[in-house]
Image: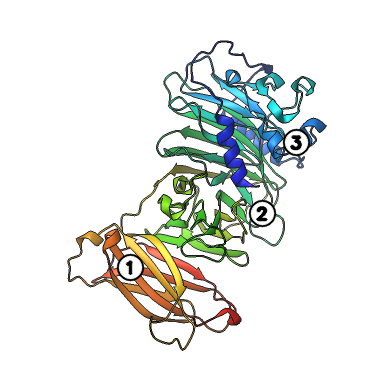
Amino acid sequence: MQRRHFVGGLAASAALQTLFGHAAGAATLETLGKPQPFDYAGLKGRARELAARAYQAPPTTLPPAIDSLDWDQHQAIRFRPEHALWRDDRLRLQAQFFHLGLFFKSPVRIHELVDGQARELAYDPSMFDYGKSGVQGSQLPKDLGFAGFRLNFHTDPERDICAFLGASYFRAVGGQWQYGLSARGLAIDSGLPRPEEFPNFVSFWLEKPAQGASSITVYALLDSPSIAGAYRFLITPGDTQVMDIDAALYPRKTIERLGIAPLTSMFQTGENDRRMANDWRPEIHDSDGLQMFTGEGEWIWRPLNNPRTLRFNAYKDLNPRGFGLMQRDRDFDNYQDDGVFYEKRPSLWVEPKAGWEAGSVQLIEIPTVDETFDNIVVLWNPDRAPQPGEELLFSYRLHWGAQPAVPPMARCLATRTGLGGIVGQARKHFSWRFAVDFAGGDLGLLGPKAKVEAVVTASRGKIEITSARPLLAINGWRAMFDVVPPPDEEPIDLRLFLSSAGQPMSETWLYQYNPPPLAERNLA
């Protein structure tokens, strides 16, 4: 998916909304059929029954007028705010809907849930303004359906707080009202040498909030060739938006790589990786690193890269305390993009609650030539492969915001790399320099004569010219070292932390360095 365009489209589609509350001419949404009892236990039973049957792919055939839409034409279709769900009820939340077309060809069923009774919402062409799309709404079938939905909060009804659209993808914002990376309900076989499977949310149930409530519960039914599942989201907007998620999964078959709480982002270039620095902007990324809080209590920072070839890393853990893709660099000057504002992109932190035992946080980095494609995937993979007929229960909490989880010790603020060696002296061999900046934690307690050591280890090659010194510009410390790689191009895993008198002073910095080909190892 061309995610830059998708994010911009969400912002544009929200621009026509008006203030919450009663509006003249507000429309009543039509429903289909009689109310049906609904609860989460019943949804889990439905998912279990679905998994026991052969998979049936969702329909993807659209009317020619919709199927032929290009990007601009599809974006010209706008939801009419007066048709929003709960428009006349003076609630703190409302729901609006996305039209099918372009990338979104499979309709999803959307229900309103009130007092334990669910009724499916009916699609009506009059709910949309077709603008310059060239589509005649009156000629569309009444059962066309919706592509997804978005939620609006009363504090700023002109911008949506989250959106569920496409497969099992969803996005949310924090207090800076900026979309960025995505989450998914589930990932199947990501990063394997075969096509990835993308499960779909095929039905949603939106529970009507109580008067004055600032949270909403959303239920979803997931289906794919390998698995079916039931989801419950408790969504609470805020400066850091929180989603409490319960998932019940029912495999149809053995799954080689199950991805729980998968996150998807984009990294093209940053101060640590200039391989694709062919743009006038200094840095281009939605996220700049993977942050982990292990079951043993270690905080880890792994800067992201845009590699030459697909890279896969697995970080084993038992009962992890958290992981997420973060955008730590929040300085506009480092991006210079006044159109999409990368410095405002949210970070996303996964906080496990139940069902997480032995497994690994897995990071997949895919080469990308520009910013229009997501190329970073992070997920939790249980050690034990799911088997057909099982019930797998997971619960976790997602935190969307600028700084949703801050380590208590000094944290890495920047990683910079370049040619190694000593300035002014002729280089006799190739080496690669790493300069890693830390600030925060207990570094401020160090006296002027305190000794700080950069503890560096490498899986291969030789470490030389190691140093650690104060960096007053950030009120922190800078660790520096060179890596002399072997003559091959195999990756080198690096590990670094700051220590004083035997006490760790910083989180652990991890990095995977891929040495360039011998022909590119220039000494100047």
The alpha-carbon separation of the residues under discs 3 and 2 comes to: 36 Å
Q: Quadrant of residue 43?
A: top right
Q: In the rendered structure, find residue 250 and report the number of the disc placed on it.
A: none
Q: Secondary structure at mark 2?
A: loop
Q: Is residue 64 left or right of residue 242?
A: right
Which of the two residues, 133 or 105, is positioned nearer the viewer here? 133
Query: Which comes before the other along the chain, label 1 or label 3?
Result: 3
Q: Secondary structure at mark 1?
A: strand
Mark closer to the observer (1, 3): 3
At label 2, the amino acid type is: Ile
Q: Which residue is mark 3?
A: 69
The alpha-carbon separation of the residues under discs 1 and 2 comes to: 44 Å
Q: Which residue is mark 2?
A: 255
Query: Which comes before the other along the chain, label 3 or label 2?
Result: 3
Query: Which comes before the other along the chain, label 1 or label 2?
Result: 2
Q: Position of residue 514 (x, y in %)?
A: 54, 73
Above or below, 53 relative to 13: below
Q: Which residue is mark 1?
A: 478
Q: Is residue 139 left or right of residue 128?
A: right
Which of the two residues, 479 or 445, is positioned nearer the viewer here? 479
Q: Secondary structure at mark 3?
A: loop
